Image: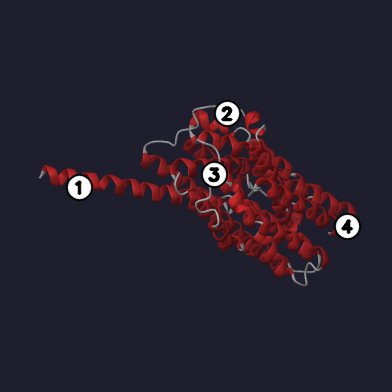
Amino acid sequence: MTSTSTTTHAAAVPATRTRAGLLTAFAVVLIALNLRLGISSTSALLGALRVSPGLSATGAALLTAMPSLCFAAAGAGTGALARRFGAERTVLLALLALTAGLAVRAVPHTGALLAGTVLGTSGLALCNVLLPTLVRTHFPDRTGLLTGLYTTALALGAALASAVAVPVADAVGSPSLGLAVWALPALVATAVWAGVRTAARTGAPGPAERIPLRSVARTRTGVLVTAYFGLQALNAYAVVGWLPSLLSGQGMSESGAGAVLALTQAVGIPMTFVMLASAKGAKGPDRLRGAFVVVSLAMLAGLGGLLVAPVTLAWAWAVLVGLGLCSFPLVLAVIAQSGGSPAETTALSTLAQSAGYLLAALGPLSVGLLHGATGGWAAPVAALLVTAGAQLAVGLALTRPR
């Protein structure tokens, strides 16, 4: 009897751990699903927001640049918060901020829109930095798989919001309420993550050691990862922020432009796994060299198409640009696999995302200002072609065999 009980108990332990692991993985994916809903829905509704609550051209440019600015500012403090509260509790606080920020945007006023965006995207910033750390901590032998799952969820959430933001806003009667609707799935993610922490009865420890960001910034990997992250984010946020406006300005309907944006982001759903399949068993970023080249060339081709024939072959350019956006999961895979400990992964992720998003803020802001100054889209798209070329050059340096 004792032997049987002992055997049963021993068999139950790994089963419990397996269930806990699956629940944690599900929660991570659910969190990721929420990390682009608010941003993509804002892009799709930008034209409607210009009417109600009467957002100015400068305000629209600021609104599209604000997420990356908040990512840079809030992301820089993530390491300190994780050391103080633990990674899991910090993620919970971040989800609460995200939910509250999205809810505040229900108020049809420019100030509420901007304030809610700052609060919500600050929560996003903390989650962005800590997701690679959580993957490294909880799934050290499956970083590629979990990175693929959660970046696919990111793309799915972005595509979903882009596709349905306009119909949802029409259904609820205003673009402001249409933006606030996305607080509901964020609230669900918050509740699930709180349940994971309660069920585990333990938090993922925050990085015990403090690794100064300046020491990471002195390394070749730190410099190249940060530069690549910033350039790909600059291009991505410029495209996501302004593609619907570019297409609708050329005569396409707002719903049609939102659908094109949805396709752009949906392409990343299957392609993320195709790209990360080449990372299986990888010991360094050089194993991803081919994937880095493919995504950069696709982005260059898609932007070139938007420059010469934006509406005529809009769906083709959407597919190419969407493939180009797969640079994001690639650089996250490099971050998750780098460093000898979760503390080092957190330090690299913090540096890359805080400094990288600061650079990325120039993308949507510059596109908006260039469009306002020239009255057209040729100059903004040409500028993005230059930054996409720089991204290719940095990617080649990062993945150079050593």
Q: Earlier in the sequence, mark 1 or mark 3?
A: 1
Q: Pointers 2 and 4 in contact (CB under 8 A)?
A: no
Q: Nearer the viewer, residue 99 or 29?
A: 29
Counting from the top left corner in percent of width and height, residue 110 is at: 73, 46
Position of the N terminus, as image quadrant, is: top left
Q: Residue at x 74, y 63 (%)?
A: 302
Counting from the top left corner in percent of width and height, residue 369 is at: 83, 49
Q: Nearer the viewer, residue 291 or 96?
A: 291
Disc 1 residue type (three-letter): Thr
Q: Residue at x 75, y 53 (%)?
A: 388
Q: Earlier in the sequence, mark 1 or mark 4?
A: 1
Element type at marker 2?
A: loop
Q: Is residue 324 left or right of residue 246?
A: left
* Mark 3 to mark 4 CA distance (whole Å): 42 Å
Pair 1/3: label in front: 3
Q: Is residue 222 above or below residue 368?
A: above
Pair 2/1: label in front: 2
**Residue 180 can be seen, yes or no:** no
Which residue is label 3 attached to? 336
Pair 2/4: label in front: 2
Disc 2 residue type (three-letter): Ile
Q: Earlier in the sequence, mark 2 or mark 4?
A: 2
Counting from the top left corner in percent of width and height, residue 310 is at: 78, 67
Position of the C terminus, as image quadrant, is: top right
Q: Which mark is residue 211?
A: 2
Q: Which mark is residue 8?
A: 1
* Mark 1 to mark 4 CA distance (whole Å): 72 Å
Which residue is label 4 attached to? 375
